Image: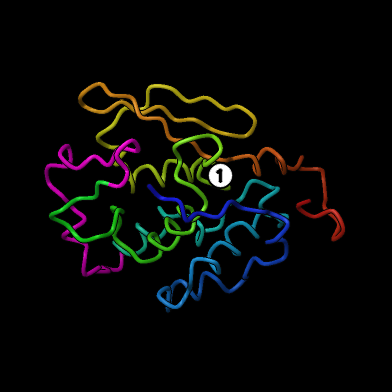
Amino acid sequence: MKTNFKKVNYPEYKGMYDEDIKARMETAPENIDIETMRASLYGYTFTKEYANGKIPDELSMDYWEERNLEIGFENPNFEDCEIPDVSKYIRTFNNIDSLLEDVDDSPYFCVSSQEKLLLEAIDSTGDGKTPETALCVIDVHQEYEYIQRVVRLSVLQLVKQSVKNGIDCLELEDYDGRIEKVYFDISRRFEVGYLNPSTTLSSDTEGT
């Protein structure tokens, strides 16, 4: 069981979004550690752009997947990640420690190091098994990006979604009819909300 996670204390990351993080992720993602990625990911929620509902490309796993496929990026582990019979390899949250024996030690299905970096940052916040250990994301779309790369949403069926106190619970059904619940902490999105188009933020109130 994963126990070495650190829940997000948002005030700790205020003002820590790195405007150059996209360029750094493009050129040398291997030089960015998880805490630095956390700082930009959760620090971004204090920006006016976040309050306006915008998520930048660098914080989108789908963006990096599409970009790297378009430019012909080849990850050394790409062939290992693309498993033909994926039904045999569903990673359930009730059995989260049982990783695949015949692939590498990465629990992620992704094609780029940028996606993996974002996944590791989110994974560092919880295990997704309970509301108390929910995975911290800054946007609902990020939940689905995560699910697609960790538990293969393409071979599961979303049967129910519910939100309570800022915790989003996704109930997924596998081929055997078993239901897995995955919890995401989306409270920051509710806390900040979305700005009315006529609303402006001052430097004193931005993203509080």
Q: Position of residue 200 (x, y in %)?
A: 83, 50
Number of numbered tags placed on the structure image:
1
Task: Name the residue located 27 percent from the left edge and 42 percent from the top edge.
Answer: 91
User: Between 115 and 23, which is closer to the camera in this rendering?
Assistant: 115
- 146 versus 80 height, above or below: above
**Position of residue 167 in the picture relative to residue 61 (left or right):** right
Q: Position of residue 181 (x, y in %)?
A: 41, 30
User: Between 106 and 118, which is closer to the camera in this rendering?
Assistant: 106
The range drawn in magenta is 70-97
- 143 versus 9 height, above or below: above
**Position of residue 165 in the picture relative to residue 171 (left or right):** right
Q: Which residue lies under the disc numbered 1?
A: 139
- 75 versus 10 height, above or below: below
Give the image quarter of residue 93.
top left
User: Secondary structure under badge 1?
Assistant: loop
Task: Name the residue located 67 percent from the left edge and 67 percent from the top edge.
Answer: 16
| Residue type, numbered disc 1 | Asp
Residue 163 colored in magenta in the image: no
- 146 versus 119 height, above or below: above
**Position of residue 2 in the picture relative to residue 95 (left or right):** right
Residues packed near mark 1 inside 10 Å, few (<14), some (14 to 19) or many (20 plus) = many
Q: Position of residue 15 (x, y in %)?
A: 72, 65
Task: Name the residue located 49 percent from the left edge and 42 percent from the top edge.
Answer: 141
Residue 71 colored in magenta in the image: yes
Q: Position of residue 161 (x, y in %)?
A: 47, 25
**Position of residue 39 in the picture relative to residue 99 (left or right):** right
Color encoding of the figure: rainbow
Give the image quarter of residue 70.
bottom left
User: Between 30 and 9, which is closer to the camera in this rendering?
Assistant: 9
